[in-house]
Image: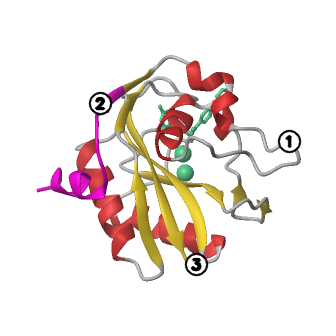
Amino acid sequence: MNTAYISIGSNIGDRLHHLVEAVRILRLREGITVTAVSSIYETAPVGFTDQADFLNMAVGVETGLVAGDLLEVCQQVEHELGRVRDIRWGPRTVDLDVLLYNNDNIETENLIVPHPRMHERAFVLIPLLEIAPLVAHPTAEAKLFAEEAAVRDEGVILWKKLNGVDELLQEGE
Ligand code: X6L
Ligand code: MG
Ligand code: MG
């Protein structure tokens, strides 16, 4: 079995609904067990800043899928929830990024893990560290993500405190 972490974000329409539905669909997929969900954070847009604030969260999964297949599932979830790719770094109904997969360093045409620049992004690190406080970058240094300067960055506020996946799924009812 493999342990992976996925970042989820939304800044179009009913943002909470998009996060809840993304987790609901992930859980229904064969070969994926959602083992942890973070709280939900409201975050200022990064990269392309002239867009609405995001809701971001992180989830931990146990999976029998190889990383490439997990990525494919993430892209299917994005598609099911109406993701359209137009503006680079622009608004999206939902975005699922594979952050970490075991302790692996992966570099294929479609997928780089750890997710590039995740260590610079508070909107990724703060939710991730809530569910995996001791997670480290899979390199020789094995540096704790908790030591990254971005963890102390501004622009990320706790929006909805959550205790577990059941509480999250109730939000969608
Ligand atoms: C210079 C150039 C500095 C580019 C930063 C940062 C680009 C992040 C893209 C960058 C740069 C990204 C989200 C977001 C995006 C999200 C929040 C991206 C891809 N996704 N902002 N911006 N949450 N708060 O999920 O991460 S676009
Ligand atoms: Mg992203
Ligand atoms: Mg993405």
Residue 166 % position (x, y): 24, 58
The reply, left or right, for residue 38 in relation to residue 68 is left
Ligand 1 under 8 Å from disc 2 Cβ: no
Residue span colored magenta: 158-173
The quadrant in which the N terminus is found is bottom right
Q: Residues within 10 Å of mark 3 (few under 14, many from 20)?
A: some
The three-letter code of the residue at mark 3 reads Leu
Residue at coordinates 34% horizontally, 28% vertically from top-left? 158
Residue at coordinates 28% horizontally, 36% vertically from top-left? 161
Residue at the bottom extreme of this rendering: 30
In the rendered image of this protein, does residue 163 appear above or below residue 110?
above
Residue 75 % position (x, y): 49, 65
Total count of labels: 3
Residue 112 picture quarter: bottom right
Disc 2 and disc 1: Cα gap in Å? 33 Å
Which residue is label 1 attached to?
141
The three-letter code of the residue at mark 2 reads Trp
The magenta stretch spans residue 171: yes
Residue 44 % position (x, y): 44, 24
Disc 3 and disc 1: Cα gap in Å? 27 Å
Assign a secondary structure to mark 1: loop
Assign a secondary structure to mark 2: strand
The magenta stretch spans residue 39: no
Q: Residues within 10 Å of mark 2 (few under 14, many from 20)?
A: few
Task: Answer with mark 3 or mark 2, whichever residue precedes in sequence.
Answer: 3
Of circles 3 and 1, the one toward us is 1
Which residue is label 3 attached to?
65
